Image (tube, helix red, strand yellow):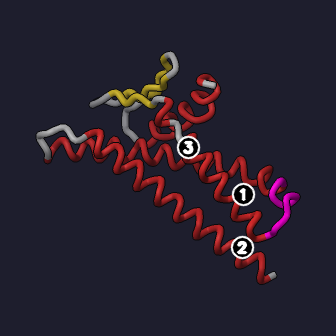
Amino acid sequence: MNILLKNLFLFPSAKLASFFINDSRVISSGWEVELLTPSILIKVTEDCSGLAFFSVTLAIILFFLYKKFKSFQTLWMGFCTVFFLVYLTTIIANSTRIVSAFYIKEISHRFFSVEIDSFLHFAVGTMVFLTFFVLIYLLLERLMNVIHKN
């Protein structure tokens, strides 16, 4: 599972994040993926994979589809259709979390003398993932309204 998790979630998220962090490169080491920046080394570990976000998002969308259409056939078709879109959304959300945490850490070290990295990491992750959940919900609501009007 670790190799699959690394190749499907960790590496693509780190690679996309490296695009937005200047002079950074992605290094694969063991079960982890590391993002080497000029100022710090970011370890993207199994805990940072976004797998929980992927699972919850997929479950929410499938529940939403079942609730709207009341059919397991629709649910299966929805699963096949939505799976890849949820995966891409997860990679984008996780990359956003990595980039946001990096820049907030860079800014916070200029203003705070104490280490608040773990709190900031948690807060940034929570805000990014909650924002993506809200956006997904709003998009689903709008999509379902359009479908029901036609």
Q: Position of residue 83 (x, y in %)?
A: 72, 48
In this view, the mark in front (1 or 2) = 1
Q: Nearer the viewer, residue 83 or 58?
A: 58
Measured in 3D between alpha carbons, the distance from the residue under mark 1 to the one under mark 3, in whole angstroms, is 15 Å
Residue under pointer 3: 52
Q: Earlier in the sequence, mark 1 or mark 3?
A: 3
* Residue most extreme to the left: 113
Answer left or right for 60 relative to 20: right
Q: Which mark is residue 144?
A: 2
**Which element carries disc 1, helix, strand or loop?**
helix
Residue under pointer 1: 62
Measured in 3D between alpha carbons, the distance from the residue under mark 2 to the one under mark 3, in whole angstroms, is 25 Å
Residue at coordinates 65% horizontally, 74% vertically from top-left? 142
Residue at coordinates 50% horizontally, 16% vertically from top-left? 30
Q: Position of residue 8 (x, y in %)?
A: 62, 33
Q: Which mark is residue 142?
A: none
Tell me if mark 1 has few (under 14), some (14-19) or many (20+) residues whose alpha carbon lies within 10 angstroms of its own. many
Measured in 3D between alpha carbons, the distance from the residue under mark 1 to the one under mark 2, in whole angstroms, is 13 Å
Q: Does the magenta segment cover residue 6?
A: no
Amino acid type at circle 2 is Met
Residue bounds of the magenta highlight: 69-76
Amino acid type at circle 1 is Leu
